[in-house]
Amino acid sequence: MAYRESRTPHSKGKVLDHLRVKEAEDGGHTVEHHYAEDGMVFHKPKVHVFGKDEGAEMMAHVSKHANVKEHAKVADEEGEE
């Protein structure tokens, strides 16, 4: 998909539409920030790369930008906290 970089004034700002998380070949992840279009204005997605040992940092990043409170404990395989 081709994107055209917009020349939106800073006062208008970008509006985050969605995040896309993809697993990388090395075991890490990439997080893409996709911005909403404003008529014929498009913003190129911003990509953040996290290594395979940076899972906690990636989850904190996604939680922050998706406005989701991070769960303090992760349930184990049996469903207990």
Image (cartoon, helix red, strand yellow):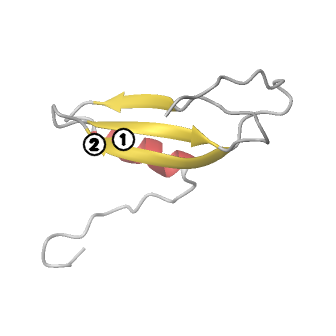
Q: Amino acid at mark 1?
A: Met
- The residue wearing badge 1 is 58
Q: Is residue 24 above or below residue 79?
A: above
- The residue wearing badge 2 is 55
Residues at badges 2 and 1 in contact (C-beta under 8 Å)? yes
* Quarter-of-image position of residue 76: bottom left
**Residue in the image at 32% along x and 43% along y:** 22
Q: Is residue 71 above or below residue 77?
A: above
Q: Position of residue 8 (x, y in %)?
A: 80, 26
57 relative to 68 in the view: left or right: left
Q: How many marks?
A: 2
Q: Residues within 10 Å of mark 2 (few under 14, many from 20)?
A: few
User: In the picture, which quadrant includes the C terminus?
Assistant: bottom left
- Name the secondary structure under disc 2: helix
Q: Position of residue 43 (x, y in %)?
A: 64, 31
14 relative to 8 in the view: left or right: left
Q: Amino acid at mark 2?
A: Gly
**Residue in the image at 42% along x and 30% along y:** 48
**Residue in the image at 66% along x and 22% along y:** 5
Q: Position of residue 61 (x, y in %)?
A: 45, 41
**Residue in the image at 17% along x and 34% along y:** 25
Q: Is residue 75 above or below residue 46?
A: below
Q: Which residue is most to the bottom?
A: 79
Camera-side residue of 47 and 55: 47
59 relative to 12 in the view: left or right: left
